[in-house]
Image (cartoon, rainbow, N blue to C red):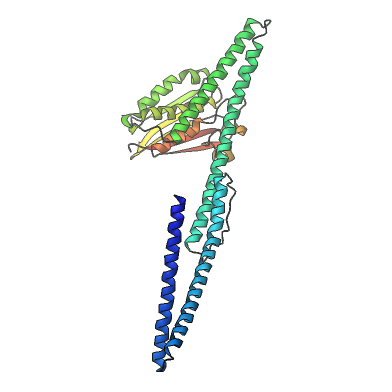
Amino acid sequence: MMKVKEIAQNIFGIILTMILLIGCFLAAYFLTSLLYNKIGQSPSALMVQIINFLLGLLFGLIVLKLALLFEQRKASLFEPVIKAQKRIARGDFSVSMDKNTEGIGPMGDLVDSVNNMALELSNMEKMRQEFISNVSHEIQSPLTSVRGFAQALRNNNLSPENKSRYLNIIEAESIRLSKLSDNLLRLASLEADTMKLAPRAYRLDKQLRRIFLASEPQWSDKNIDMVVSLEEIEIKADEDMMSQLWTNLIYNSIKFTEAGGKVSVDLYQEGDIIEFKISDTGIGIADEDQIHVFERFFKADKSRKPSINGSGLGLPICKKIVEMHQGTIGVKSKLGTGTTFIVNLPSGF
């Protein structure tokens, strides 16, 4: 197949060269004829043929030289692009071509696109490496606990109380691993758009009341004062996804609120926009950490106690669900005084 293609290219090159030479000789003939008519005299027929031949040959050499210069120019322009693309194909995303693209027209756009592609792929590779590192770190901690306490249970001299405590720890760490796995799969499905929305109209205030009732053991155990104000609002949305959103936000506020604290929830509608606001008197989030709270695996270490566990996936899941419903989610917080999450959603989309 390649030989046939090469033969066809060679034949095309020969034909093109012959056409160019014929064109050069014709140009020489018409040029000399015009010149002879201007001066009113003509040399002998032999001399005319010789002059036309030499002039046509000169024109041919000039055209050939210009063609070679064009090919060299084209090669000099495309060679760096080809080399850059080969490096990118090998996984080297540190490519940065010369950005001085003035005067080379569309070639400048090509250079810029290659640089942008390399930059985006580099960022994606960094995110991938960071994701793998974070997942490994999150999994390693509970696995270490499970392995350590499982080995400790082999000690026949352990008291029944210690055995029960170790088994409770193993169970809790296993639940933590299971939850991490579920959140990872959910977030991956949301980001890959494999989870399709199934919107339907339902009462949002009733859904929130059910979630508050389900979370009563958590806030009652910490003696948290729950202040809830819910307007009767109907929304058209994916009910299951919305349930995940509210559950994450409500449990998050309960988790980071000290015993005896307060959690306030407001739900109201202005025009076509529904606003959900949940505020707590918890430990708060530092100013420099607030821009990162919706990033995967992010944990505001300065504002969290070591005893509070979390995978750092709940809020990214919330953000993705809100975005899929064409809404917005934001956070306002001050370290040591509490946090407020605000969700704005269209009543129907």
- Judge by depth and name the residue closer to the eye, 23 or 198: 23
Corner quadrant of residue 228: top left
Q: Is residue 23 above or below residue 345?
A: below
State the residue lying farthest toward the left: 201
State the image coordinates of residue 277 (x, y, percent, origin top left). 44, 33
State the residue lying farthest toward the bottom: 40
Corner quadrant of residue 7: bottom left
State the image coordinates of residue 85 (x, y, percent, origin top left). 54, 50
**Residue 254 visible (yes or no):** no
Residue 331 appears left or right of 145: left
Q: Is residue 112 above or below residue 53?
A: above
Residue 306 appears left or right of 314: right
Residue 264 appears left or right of 148: left
- Residue name at image x 41 percent, y 94 percent: 41
Corner quadrant of residue 203: top left
Q: Is residue 114 above or below residue 307?
A: below
Quadrant placement of the C terminus: top left
- Judge by depth and name the residue closer to the eye, 225 or 18: 18
State the image coordinates of residue 66 (x, y, percent, origin top left). 51, 71
**Residue 72 visible (yes or no):** yes
- Judge by depth and name the residue closer to the eye, 65 or 105: 65
- Residue name at image x 51 percent, y 67 percent: 70
State the image coordinates of residue 266 (x, y, percent, origin top left). 42, 31
- Number of numbered discs: 0
